[in-house]
Image (tube, coloured by chain):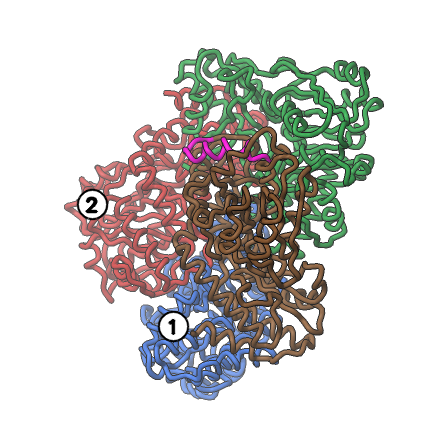
Chain colours: A red, B blue, C green, D brown
Amino acid sequence: MTRKILMHVGPETIDYEVLLAGVRGDVGFTSKEFTDVMRYSLSFLRKLTNAPSYQAFIIPGGGTSAMESISSLIKKGENILVVSNGVFGDRWEKIFSRYPVNLKTLRAKAGYYIKPEEVLDEVKKSKINVVTLTHVETSTGVREPIQSVIKEIRDYVDLVVVDGVSSIGAEEVRAEDWKADVYLTASQKAIGAPPGAGLLVVSNKALERLSSESISSFYLDLRNWLPVMKAFDEGKSAYFSTLPVHLIFMLAKAFELMDKEGIENRIGRHEKISSAIRAGIEGMGLDIVAKNPEAYSNTVTGVMLNKVNPSDVLTRMVSEGIELAPGVHPDLAGKYFRIGHMGWTNENDVISTISALERVLKVLGEPIRFGEGVKAVQETLSS
Amino acid sequence: MTRKILMHVGPETIDYEVLLAGVRGDVGFTSKEFTDVMRYSLSFLRKLTNAPSYQAFIIPGGGTSAMESISSLIKKGENILVVSNGVFGDRWEKIFSRYPVNLKTLRAKAGYYIKPEEVLDEVKKSKINVVTLTHVETSTGVREPIQSVIKEIRDYVDLVVVDGVSSIGAEEVRAEDWKADVYLTASQKAIGAPPGAGLLVVSNKALERLSSESISSFYLDLRNWLPVMKAFDEGKSAYFSTLPVHLIFMLAKAFELMDKEGIENRIGRHEKISSAIRAGIEGMGLDIVAKNPEAYSNTVTGVMLNKVNPSDVLTRMVSEGIELAPGVHPDLAGKYFRIGHMGWTNENDVISTISALERVLKVLGEPIRFGEGVKAVQETLSS
Amino acid sequence: MTRKILMHVGPETIDYEVLLAGVRGDVGFTSKEFTDVMRYSLSFLRKLTNAPSYQAFIIPGGGTSAMESISSLIKKGENILVVSNGVFGDRWEKIFSRYPVNLKTLRAKAGYYIKPEEVLDEVKKSKINVVTLTHVETSTGVREPIQSVIKEIRDYVDLVVVDGVSSIGAEEVRAEDWKADVYLTASQKAIGAPPGAGLLVVSNKALERLSSESISSFYLDLRNWLPVMKAFDEGKSAYFSTLPVHLIFMLAKAFELMDKEGIENRIGRHEKISSAIRAGIEGMGLDIVAKNPEAYSNTVTGVMLNKVNPSDVLTRMVSEGIELAPGVHPDLAGKYFRIGHMGWTNENDVISTISALERVLKVLGEPIRFGEGVKAVQETLSS
Amino acid sequence: MTRKILMHVGPETIDYEVLLAGVRGDVGFTSKEFTDVMRYSLSFLRKLTNAPSYQAFIIPGGGTSAMESISSLIKKGENILVVSNGVFGDRWEKIFSRYPVNLKTLRAKAGYYIKPEEVLDEVKKSKINVVTLTHVETSTGVREPIQSVIKEIRDYVDLVVVDGVSSIGAEEVRAEDWKADVYLTASQKAIGAPPGAGLLVVSNKALERLSSESISSFYLDLRNWLPVMKAFDEGKSAYFSTLPVHLIFMLAKAFELMDKEGIENRIGRHEKISSAIRAGIEGMGLDIVAKNPEAYSNTVTGVMLNKVNPSDVLTRMVSEGIELAPGVHPDLAGKYFRIGHMGWTNENDVISTISALERVLKVLGEPIRFGEGVKAVQETLSS
């Protein structure tokens, strides 16, 4: 059976309207059709992140390429503070360890996040040029209070960069009001398109740091992409290196459907869905990885198991027509799995997931309160 | 009318079977389905490049990301010789100018290529660690005699890297026999899938150069991708950064159709098609950018104009349902355009292109022998 | 949101693999590709109905055109007995009332079926040439015990014709063993393809009745279609009137997926799904239209409401992403709606449907035991 | 290679936008989405046939089902005159020979048409209730001067029915001004959608003849479909027998693209294309089946062969990526084939077809003036 629900962390279930938008045999990278969807997509990306005056970028790759592209904004010897709540926070550290910069990392325990005041303490200690934050840590589902952190530290640092990979499109994001310099994501996350593009909005202040002196390599040097994006913004074709044309038609369709749903409504839907997922998990008596309700995210829920092997759960869930995501945080290896609930996830997906999960866990012998998860979902959805 | 023939340099006309293969709502990046197509695609890439013992890589991006990824094989201070026949040869220079290496470039005039003996002379002068070659220079359609060049220089250099972007899938490529260490391309070129992936085969000797000491940055460090590719080769799922899942389903379908056609047959088709295109161009009395029949490629033909503006030609050709590629070589700016004839291009596309081109050039006032282009195509196709 | 679950009576939710199989620009009605899928589809239709020696037909239209086409087997003045359990049983009567035949109808009350012995009594009374039966009455979800009825009456009548529209593909059907002369369905029912074709298997004995003397009109005269079907059976192209080519590619894909699932497994899935639906309905305290558990079908469940308007339920369910079918039996007008559960329906669809239905009915004020429906589904699926 | 050009008589090459419009998993036959496309399609069908006050019908099947459905307008014993220019004119005779009516046929020789004055002579002889005409005879490509014929006979007959199967969408059709009572076609012809629906516009005067006394059978009785079409016209859902839902989404997309092109422009395109096809055929020295330039149609060209077997030509053309249609007129059996040029056919298809045809005929040994066909096409397209 090919009818599968993807409660994964991206790609997750994708609306077929999005997928079909890429089935085009008539679109060269210099075509008017492509120029039109690029212009629209860049414009909508600003709207989605509430960054009207920022420059939007759509570049090949995904979250990691978008993250690394900010090396274009950094000079040799600068000081970078990585605020890490898990695997993808640590990714910033791994990226910058390849560059001639001074690197400091604040690392939270699995399931926790670094508090705003801890970041403040750190940036006060010594001059920090760039702080990297992770809005929602995909490896654990923990959400950082971005607005508060930036408020605390804004005066002390040059550049605030936010990984919004599991947030943009599903959580409130106000890049400009909150004074983040860079907010980035990937096409396959809460945007709900296939993977293949990294998306960024960058403040003009940050763009001033672009120079031939930056530490960046070539392909991900935003200096190369800037004139291309500016051209598309003006409705003109431009080229640096071939963009994923067909994917961007899909991305534009995802943006169009988002706009039709309404960004507020979309965030509201993710909130409701995620509440119902957590109600289901807790109803059946399992623990959530995120330790603090304030840290619950709209997009990813880590689920702790007491007895059975998460990979057995995932395998059986696939037989039930539902694909979940493995746990990847090394400190919780073998103890948890993740449910992604982003993009086009709806209430039917939630009840299906919790229903199947109860049945699978029962068969595998995990001690749960069978039926109570489903009951809790039903009550949450009904409220 | 959306029925357009793309005689572009990638994406060009794509078979709809390929495009439809990406319309899947059921494929997470850890799914068995994805693991299967990765395994198949890596395996077929080896077959296509005649590199059975090499490691194949499929990474996000395209030609440029594939090119830059070889920074993973290079150490600080090494000597690199760029053999450039045009814009994409020069791209190697631009890439490496971001890195702490010693760079030397041999640059051909537009329409010409650097002869094997010229490369030999150069590598004899001083120690060269890495030579980069361009099999077919996409900006001019000029083909380098790769086998001869490598034969001359093989003993003098550590690493021979070939940009096969406009050749793999349409020209004879025997990476292993010819002793190229790296042969690379992009999904949207002669492979005939949409853009979004860089493809490489790398010799084991070259892989030994992978180390934490390489000059490479993070995302394009092949060290990060190697275990992932090895896992897929063994039929196991693995993750470093999300691959363009849906695109790779399309890529695998393109490979499957290639295999059905037969690689030899496919190269033969490209030869015949390109001969017919050139016969048409010369029949109507126009010059081809490549100055030497030995340098004619199977995939790209640059066409010189004597009077009218190439961009006017391209615009009118779109109205005729055919999209060509603009000229991009700065030395020939405003004097030529390109016809891409790769991937799924067939004889019907050729006669259509030359027929429409004659009509468009006639209307625009370019002096041509109207009717003689079409006649020459018809005779070539019939022979 | 375009992600909708169709719990309708056809078209219902269709697997996208099926839909995509029709996206072909290269298939004329004389193409080898079309000939191949026709041959395969005719062959699989025999397998699906357990009618290896029968002639299979795929004709344009749907259930009604398939029903009317049996006029080709009937001569002026013959006696026809219609055994009707509802709207689609009555359709036989409406069809034959346009023809010069003698018509008698046994009509069951809504929710009931005509018992085998009642049919026997009737056929004993006077010579009956043709009896029409309805395996599953789509208007009420009532299943007739086809095998028993035929066993009783087989010796008394010339031709036994079974409307298997809501059964073939989801209920056990053994056309040949049970000695039905004609078993028919439509592409969009339990087959799970889009609407557009009527499908029949016809015994050789019945085919002997084909003649220029039959009462049939032109388009639906099986005499015209017989040589076409025989040609396709032999792998040859043939033409009477253009078949729905693209639909038949989809039909063939549906058959291929069926074969992969296994016909037995598929019937088993429908049994499990339908039990769970009924458990859910009864769990929340509502009545099922079919009055007798023996009459429960695998494909359609009629649901009685006590208070609220069925059309309000359907409208709200659409907002919940689930499309149900209106009630159409005139005797129950305004009192019930239908849930279709056929084709590609799975367990996730069932829990989603009952969950949403509870929530919708609660909001609308229908007295139900909220939560008990979902609980019952979960228990049924788990058992 | 799946990239094939269908120069067939329907389905011919279909724009992929049309095909993809049917890939929808969310459209039950009672859905608002379906109601919307039905309303639009009925409305556009009136526009396309210039029949603003007529009732439009979209029924399952195709040309033949649409033809037979006019039995709903006819009573027992009425006099019908069939004006036949070939196989599809004769089809009217075959249809009505199944009914209790008096039938007279005027039959033209292959390649010719019945002149208006011949029809007039006939209708003057005795009372004729219904005359059937064929606008373009698909078996030969001969066009009847519909407007003139109707002008001559209008006062003498009750009902004038025109088979516009190979004309509507490609030839001028003014149903209301010309006073045709019925104009009909099928979805897969010049409309350019897949096969599966018959389309009709019917005058109100003709609709008054609908009654329980008509000779029609059940499925094709327009009395059953009339309330359904009226409901859709008012934006309401209705049901008689399931319509080909997905096909109608494709049909609506074809109509939408037509509207975008402009009906006048579309007819103009067909004129130009057909002139070029004929120029090519005559250029290479072959004869056209239609004997009189006045009878040349915009949609179908029959091509006479002098030596080689048409079926060999068709087989080899498929290898060249072009599918033509076999000849079907019994009087010319084995002597001709047909080129369909309707729907989305463009200038590139024409030059491709004539180019390939010359090459194929040369190889097979048919005496032609090689190169002159292509030359003539090029000149025609350029003029």
Identify the image quadrant of residue D218: top right
The amino acid type of the residue labelled 1 equals Trp
Is residue B153 or residue C147 the one in the foreground? C147
Q: Position of residue D215 (x, y in %)?
A: 63, 34
User: In the visual, does A4 lie left or right of C127?
Assistant: left
Position of D370 relative to B227 (above/below): below
The answer for which chain carries disc 1 is B
Q: Is residue C220 visible?
A: no
Give, as a single range, the part of the protein colored magenta: D220-237
Q: Secondary structure at mark 2?
A: helix
Secondary structure, mark 1, is: helix
Name the residue tied to disc 2: A176
Asked if badge 1 and badge 2 are on a common chain, one would say: no
- The residue lying toward the viewer, choosing from D171 and C360, is D171
> How many neighbours does mark 1 have within 10 angstroms: few (below 14), some (14-19), or many (20 or more)?
many
Q: Position of residue B253 (x, y in %)?
A: 56, 56
